[in-house]
Image (cartoon, grey):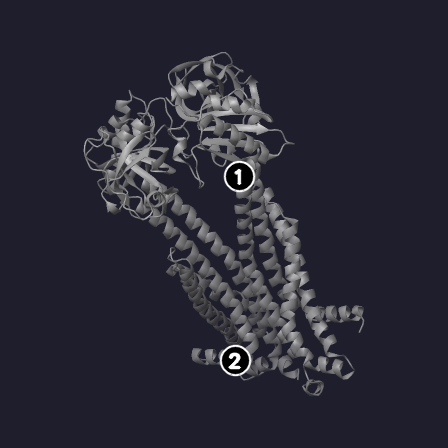
Amino acid sequence: MKSGDVIQFSWKALSGYPTRTLLMILAMAIGVASVILLTALGEGARRFVTDEFTSLGTYLLIVLPGRSETTGGPPPLLGETPRDLTLEDALSLIRSSSIRRMAPITVGSAPVSWKHRDREVTVLGSTAELFEIRHLSMAQGRFIPAGDPSRGLAVCVMGYKLKKELFGNQSPLGEWVRIGDRRFRVIGVLAKKGQSLGLDMGDVVVVPVASAQALFNTSALFRILLQANGREAIPKAKKAVLATIRERHEGEDDVTVITQDALLSTFDRILVAMTLSVAGIAAISLSVAGILIMNVMLIAVSQRTTEIGLLKAIGARGTHILWLFLAESAILSLIGAGFGLILAFLGNWGLGHAFPKLSITAPIWALAAAVSVALLTGLVFGVLPARRAARLDPVQALSRR
Amino acid sequence: MLINDSAKLATAALSSQRMRSFLTALGIAVGIASVVLLTSIGEGIHKFVLSEFTQFGTNLIAVSPGKTTTAGISGAIISNVRPLSIDDALALGRSPKILGVVPFVQGNAPVEFGKHSRRTYVFGVGSQVPTVWQMKVGMGRFLPDDDPRTARAFAVLGSTVKDELLGSVNPLGRRIRIGGERYRVIGVMESKGQMLGFDLDDAVYIPTQRALAMFDRESLMEIDMIYGGDSNVDDIVKNVKALLMDRHGAEDFTITTQEQMLDVLGSVLNILTLAVGALGGISLLVGGVGILTIMTISVNERRAEIGLLRAIGAGRGQILSLFIGEAVVLSSIGGLAGLMIGAGGAWLLGAVVPALPTHTPWLYVVLAEILAALIGLMAGVLPAHRAANLDPIEALRAE
């Protein structure tokens, strides 16, 4: 038999029973669609997190004070140490040739007040370079001016949310606000950027690092953000930081350096694992659809006994019959997968409209995997009925009626 | 027709087509099994996380500096202009119904003994840690009840630090250096193990005032309090708030109760369990489509039988209930099998991988079984309706 004939024959057999064929296609389509949709969701989440990390800055290194002995555990996040990481430490790091930019950061919380309004916000002490490193953008005015970082100017830059709460629709530029017990002149407002990894950049006020240190009466830095010269320079920069700090801290290794890549790859691994397991769970439904196909094909074999007997009587071999039935289940699962794809695309489109922030597109490998798994289940579950059909004795099969 | 007869007819119909019934039930069984297994894992993780958090006791209240409206680490914990002081903690300790108070500050410092040195967490705490955090001292005793403002230089070691630093040497009475300052070891904590990836034993405990001095800080990071089990949380929170407002003049602190935290955590974990269960439910849906398909086929095959039943006087309702009953029995059997596979799988998984906690929530199990029967009912309605509407004459002629 030619392959064209096989397909035509199977197609006729399938379209002879439209209800059951449609139902089987529906079952397969649900399975394929759920696999693709869930993978697309997982991919969307992964891409969202990756973007979030890249928006933090590029070629970023973060220096934290303190170090814990066990590797792999969480780094000392709150970072109180007997020996502070100071502004001088930070300034010494910039001398390394593999480091392009440096921004020291102190963090604290203080009430910001203007006239009668008062709001407790996070105060970030930093320098002009933070603007470049964190890819910030301004809505109004300008960022903290460059200059000697150890001199604390009485200027501040507000997040958009803080500005709205304190000033409403008025322009805050040039106004004096009180932060803690000091006065600062507002010189700029940050553009809306949304949450970035826990810290809401809308609800902060940025002041020069020396002013923040004076405000909180501390000489310690909370973090140092560094931008390396390029991707290759990151390990070199890390080594340089550790060496410089060791020298300055009398031979003690008391800082932790986190590279953005390491952080990113950790998150990436977790999210890929999650996507795969969710897709795997959805794939269970494919096996249920496979069982259904097997069941219906078994019924079809017993219903079409005479037909098979006739085929055998006019010279069809066992393998021919086998192929006929296998082709039938393959066609079923392929059509099912096709409808599943359409369903998944519709679902993706709907989800994309519901959550415009997540870019939901199924990766090509997921499409290919879902379709091929569907085809495979169809074939695997089709083997048993097909073999049963192939083994039928033509005489008995024909004599039944 | 008696119910007994209907049941007999349905089971006879099912058992005459054994392979077909088995495969249909198998489809449902796979669906139910995956729902049960997945919710078991979800519920197990839920229980595990909650027990991790409640190991410090459930009647806890924490006060941290800074007024925060959203969750997450507030900048105020790192530095602030309105510190939370040891005196605040002392005042809270004197207020009614508070059984114990721990003024808390943490940092990272090298601990040295002889030639060995290890960087580890340093917790500045008060003497009441064993009651408030429900921790046990394994050897020696915990920090004494000194005046917190002039506490003596005593240290208590976590078990990991003791093992790494002193090995088999008896630690009690030894002098160690923490961040360059000299301390005398007066106790070792019992091992508490990991909590969510965080080694609780890799820490040393020193008096709060000394930790504040070592880290050159004014403000505590947190004040933890424990209250009696019989008192009302809201009253205590109100008292604490009033007292601190009196002392500070404004609300520049945040009060978190363990109950709130557990509530938030519990609801997040519930959603997780539900979502995972719903993922398993996709398979159940496909299984339902399977029943629908098979019932449709079987109605087609048994037209003659239906015609005969109608001819000898069976009503439409009877035919309807007969076929629906068949579908429900099919899916219930599948559901039961799925339950056994799922619960057994969960138990096996828990036994083989002890790190992965599983707990089969019986509520979900019952729900899943009811769901299976419901799916059978819904999948049965359409074919049964078709069967009931057959014209008996037409149906009989089909043979």
Mark 1: few, some, or many residues within 10 Å (few <14, many ≥20)?
few
Quarter location, residue A151: top left
Q: Quarter of the image containing the C terminus of chain A?
A: bottom right
In this view, A195 is above or below A2: above
Disc sitting over residue A15 in the figure:
2
Can you see residue A379? no
In the image, A222 versus A268, the foreground residue is: A222
What percent of the width, then of the height, locates residue A103? 26, 35
In the displayed structure image, the side of residue A126 where residue B364 appears, left or right: right
Chain of the residue under the numbered disc 2 shown in the image: A
* Left or right: where B343 falls relative to B10: left
Q: Is residue A67 above or below residue A6?
A: above
Q: Secondary structure at mark 1?
A: helix
Q: Residue at x 54, y 65 (%)?
A: A290
Q: Which residue lies under the disc numbered 1? A: B261
Depth check, mark 1 against mark 2: the one in front is 1
Few, some or many C-alpha atoms within 10 Å of disc 2 (few <14, some 14-19, many ≥20)? few
Name the residue at 43% across, 15% down: B176
